[in-house]
Image (cartoon, rainbow, N blue to C red):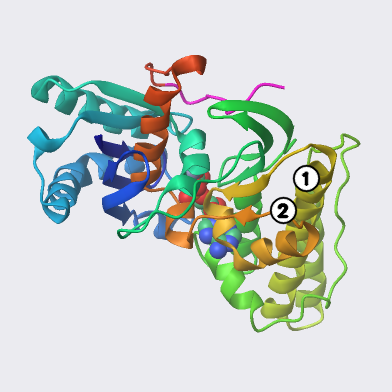
């Protein structure tokens, strides 16, 4: 089954062609750079950029796949969670395509997309599918959810952030250190030249077994930065490395705890922050189960992950397929 899939929930415009939920036939992503100037995403600007980009990106995705709409069996698009204007542009566009070509439309939860990115592959040889049940950590610019994936599309919430998302913490600390936007990759790069043991930062316990809180850590970095500035010089790589180690340890500790507590076969990561190589290493050090992480370009938002999740939505309709566009759409219930 060939799915044409569209992602516009935030600041990446993505269109992909995916076969049987796993093989990437084409995957074109345009990251909006207009937000670098504002140091953060302006929703209205993001929506307009999606509108401007969708036509050329769709054409390119189909051209790279050497297909046209007639070759497609269904059209999928993210319907939430995300920026409402941005979501509406992509979902409405996809619905229009589906209607005009007489193909079914599949609404996809963006967070399921991040999970199903672990099923994708490029090339001719299919790697084995992740074995379920699994502990899954979805860490993005807006979410930090630790879930138990009992079966396809069956998620139980174990813990989440009680304040900022992990990616948001990366972005805010990067801004504080004058590194730019989006912050995650810039912190990771700066941290390579730093000593992660330079500064001890607080890990902000929440009291709940699997929840996390990053606001204390963020404030501690702010205080540290001011103090260092007062002393004349901020060793940015050392601060970045110390922050990265602390936040990654917080996430890895919870993943390892869940992997030990529940009888699972696999640990999976997803979402933009999962592109962080130090996070993978930190988790790998603590768990002996197979760890599945999509390659970095499939961790950040893209159309292919929506095609994968769309396919498995059709195959496992049990938990329903969302159709209405919503800015709030949880991955799992407690
Ligand atoms: O999943 P994603 O592309 O978009 C959302 O659904 O939010 O995640 C974007 C987030 C941003 O906060 C970005 O700073 C972070 O993922 N990110 C990273 C890395 N690459 C992207 N965080 C840490 N290390 C990275 N290498
Ligand atoms: Zn995302």
Asked if residue 196 is positioned above or below residue 174 in the image, the reply reads: below
Residue 298 seen in the current view? yes
Q: Which mark is residue 150?
A: none
**Label 1 residue near ligand 1, CB within 8 Å:** no
* Residue on which the image places disc 1: 259
Q: Residue at x 76, y 66 (%)?
A: 245
Quarter holding residue 209: top right
Q: Position of residue 252 (x, y in %)?
A: 76, 54
Which of the image's four quarters has the C terminus?
top right
Query: Which is nearer the eye, 158 or 216?
Result: 158
Tell me the SS state at disc 2.
Answer: loop
Quarter holding residue 55: top left
Q: Residue at x 70, y 81 (%)?
A: 194
* Residue on which the image places disc 2: 289
Where are the magenta residues, as a range? Answer: 326-334
Q: Would residue 114 be found to the left or right of residue 171 on screen? A: left
CB within 8 Å, label 2 to label 1: yes
Query: Which is nearer the eye, 142 or 225?
Result: 142
| Classed neighbour count for the residue bearing mark 2: other residues with Cα under 10 Å, few (<14), some (14–19), many (≥20) | some
Q: Earlier in the sequence, mark 2 or mark 1?
A: 1
Q: Main secondary structure of the magenta part?
A: loop
Query: Which is nearer the eye, 144 or 227?
Result: 144
Q: Residue at x 10, y 25 (%)?
A: 101
């Amino acid at each position: 089954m060939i799915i044409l899939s569209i992602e516009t929930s935030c600041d990446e415009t993505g269109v992909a062609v995916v076969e049987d939920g796993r093989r990437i036939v084409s995957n074109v992503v345009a990251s909006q750079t207009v937000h670098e100037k504002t140091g953060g995403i302006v929703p209205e600007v993001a929506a307009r950029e999606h509108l401007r980009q969708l036509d050329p990106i769709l054409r390119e995705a189909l051209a790279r796949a050497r297909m046209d709409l007639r070759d497609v069996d269904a059209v999928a698009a993210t319907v939430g969670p995300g920026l409402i204007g941005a979501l509406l542009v992509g979902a409405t566009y996809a619905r229009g395509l589906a209607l005009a070509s007489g193909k079914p439309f599949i609404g996809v939860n963006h967070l399921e997309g991040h999970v199903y990115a672990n099923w994708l592959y490029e090339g001719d040889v299919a790697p084995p599918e992740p074995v379920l049940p699994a502990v899954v950590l979805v860490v993005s610019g807006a979410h930090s959810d630790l879930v138990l994936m009992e079966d396809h599309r069956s998620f139980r919430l174990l813990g989440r952030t009680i304040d900022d998302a992990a990616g948001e913490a990366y972005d805010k600390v990067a801004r504080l250190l004058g590194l730019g936007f989006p912050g995650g990759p810039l912190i990771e790069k700066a941290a390579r030249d730093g000593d992660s043991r330079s500064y001890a930062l607080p890990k902000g316990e929440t009291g709940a077994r699997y929840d996390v809180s990053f606001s204390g850590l963020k404030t501690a970095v702010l205080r540290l930065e001011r103090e260092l500035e007062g002393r004349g010089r901020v060793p940015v790589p050392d601060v970045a490395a110390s922050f990265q180690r602390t936040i990654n340890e917080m996430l890895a500790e919870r993943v390892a705890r869940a992997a030990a507590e529940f009888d699972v076969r696999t640990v999976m990561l997803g979402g933009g922050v999962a592109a962080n190589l130090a996070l993978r290493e930190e988790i790998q050090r603590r768990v002996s189960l197979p760890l599945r992480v999509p390659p970095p370009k499939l961790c950040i938002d893209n159309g292919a992950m929506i095609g994968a999740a769309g396919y498995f939505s059709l195959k496992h309709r049990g938990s329903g397929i969302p159709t209405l566009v919503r800015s709030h759409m949880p991955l799992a219930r407690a």
